[in-house]
Image (cartoon, grey):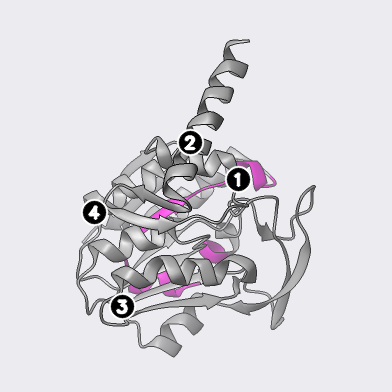
Amino acid sequence: MLLWFRSFNRRRRVAKFERKNGSRYTFRSISVDIPKDVSFDLKNALLREKYETEECTFIERYLSPAMDVIELGGSIGVLSAFTRSRLEPNTRQIVVEANPDIAEICRRNIAPYDTMGTSKVIQAAVSYSEKDSITFFTGENPHVGRIGGTGQGGKQIEVPVTRLEDICAENGIDRFALICDIEGAEVELIEKSALWKTHCALIILETHPGFYADGTHTQNDLVAKILAAGFRQLDAQRGVYAFGRSA
């Protein structure tokens, strides 16, 4: 009964907010547009300042405003806009989002903070297969879309493929910070890409042991691989890690 009442109150609060403010939500230091069909849970998290708390904290704490950023898994662009707002105007930001239905929303949310046109959204999935495209499951909300996923409330679509190496080569990116939330595909990225080992100065990584074949064993293995590549763990909260160069 208590949980039902709490949920009812939160839904009422979101509905009241939208009657007054429409689709424009204020989050931390930014303002973003949240489409009507986005899940209640995401809207509630924004209102309560509990959206991507760990990532935001690590960005505030460790990201240099002069460091180029590659973000994998941009979703509707809330975190992307927050990151952009903290970067120097001429610092480059490349955001990758596979779902074409929300990639344009991501662009729109970044745009007010991209005063020099140095941000770019790429509609693609990160994959190290030999194919030029891959099947992507959109999920029932922007936060659960992933390569090879299935389930209720989403659809399977074919999307173009990109790789960290392609992103850097095509955009002239050398040293960069990596922000990564790609619903399990981080395993392939860490295992098959060598570029992050040599060109990445900061990694902010959300892990997804629920999607890994060996769960927390694979999560621990990912952390070990990053540490072995010359990084040190700066922080960790609720499955989100921050790593910086040891030297």
Q: Earlier in the sequence, mark 1 or mark 4?
A: 1
Q: Amino acid at mark 3?
A: Arg
* Tag 3 and tag 2, C-beta contact below 8 Å: no
In the displayed structure image, the side of residue 109 where residue 97 appears, left or right:
right
| Mark identifier at residue 62 | 4
> Which residue lies at the image location 38% right of the left edge and 41% below the top edge?
53
Q: Within the magenta stretch, is there residue 25?
A: no
Which mark's residue is nearer the viewer, 1 or 2?
Answer: 2
Checking the image for residue 39, the label placed there is 1
Magenta part of the protein: which range? 189-213
Q: Earlier in the sequence, mark 1 or mark 2?
A: 2
**Residue that carries the numbered disc 3 in the rendered image:** 92
Label 1: which secondary element: loop
Above or below: residue 203 compared with residue 196: above
Point 60% across, 75% down: residue: 124
Q: Position of residue 172 (x, y in %)?
A: 36, 88
Say above or below: 33 vs 131: above
Q: CA distance from mark 1 to mark 4?
A: 30 Å
Q: Residue at x 57, y 24 (%)?
A: 7
Q: Nearer the viewer, mark 3 or mark 4?
A: 3
Residue 214, image x, y percentages: 66, 43
Per the image, label 2 sits on a secondary structure element best described as helix
The residues tagged by marks 3 and 4 sit, at their Cα atoms, a distance apart of 17 Å
